[in-house]
Image (cartoon, rainbow, N blue to C red):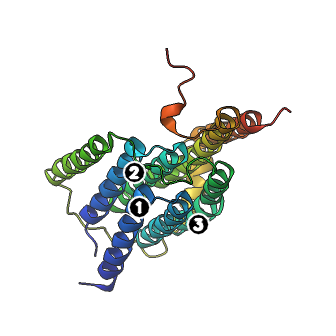
Amino acid sequence: MIPLSWYLILSAGLFSIGLFGVLSRRNAVAILLGVELMLNAVNVNLVAFWRYGDLAQMAGQVFAIIVFAVAAAEVAVGLALIISVYRRRNTVVANDIDLMKW
Amino acid sequence: MTAQQIIFLVVGFVTLGSALMVVTSHNLIHAALWLVSTLFGVAIIYTLLNAGFLAVVQVVVYIGAIAILFIFAVMLTRKDMRDQSPQLNKNWWVGALLAVVTFGGLFFLLQSWSGFSRTAADLPSGFDAIGRLGEALVSPDAFVLPFEVASVLLMAALVGAVYLAFNRK
């Protein structure tokens, strides 16, 4: 059997890689790619704790499904924002989107 | 080492490797395709965790919808970053440092937890995970409220996305 620790380490690694992507990429679409990696890491954790905890409690799987829904909503709105900014300002570099900077 | 462990190790390394390619690849289309590979790896991890329904949803929703949406967005905004300009900002080492510190901190915290290396109990025979999940999602004393709130959120996001990306001219 696979110990719980393997899943947790995989998930921590995936989360850290996503965090690096969010903090270091210049392209706004690539930043959203990093956010997706982080959400997937969270989902692996939720499902692993469901499997290794009390099987009768379905909370882990239910929350994983809700994370799916939130991720879909986040991507739809995020990409719409990026496309809208690209149309108006002709850039997707996060540094150049400073319209609201004081 | 059992077969399950070997499968987990192979899939885990492929998943982490493609995740690294997602955040470092120069070409964004390639990054989106590496994301598809990562998501497939996570779907296999769900299968190893006996969550077959989530594995299917992962393939249908994440790979079928979200990754394709990313590829469309990259193609619609491509003109800009196609050149040889750097893909990482000038503070990328701070991001790398924070990521390493986060991983180290998580590992340290988890490894001092007593349940860290516990193993899973066998599934009881005739355990119907999908049926239980469906009941939990719609039964009033379980998760019907978060389920409905999620559907309202999806609706609002849909309307918002159409409104934002709509070209008025």
Residue ID at (39%, 42%): B89
Question: Are circles 2 and 3 on residues that touch, CB within 8 Å?
Answer: no
Residue ID at (48%, 33%): A95
Q: CA distance from mark 1 to mark 3?
A: 17 Å
Residue underneath mark 3 = B59
Of the two numbered discs 2 and 3 in the rendering, the one whose residue sits closer to the viewer: 2
Residue ID at (53%, 25%): A98
Horizontal and vertical percent position of residue B83: 54, 53
The residue type indicated by label 3 comes to Val
**Outermost residue toward the left in this view:** B112
- Examine the rendered structure and indicate whether residue A30 appears above or below residue A88: below
Q: CA distance from mark 1 to mark 2?
A: 8 Å
The residue type indicated by label 2 comes to Gly
Mark 2 surroundings: few (<14), some (14-19) or many (≥20) residues within 10 A? many
Q: Is residue B108 left or right of residue B140?
A: left
Residue underneath mark 2 = A18
- Examine the rendered structure and indicate whether residue A96 appears above or below residue A23: above
Parent chain of label 2:
A
Horizontal and vertical percent position of residue A25: 43, 46
Mark 1 surroundings: few (<14), some (14-19) or many (≥20) residues within 10 A? many
Residue B19 numbered tag: 1
Determine if residue B140 is in view: no
**Which is nearer the eye, B137 or B61?**
B61
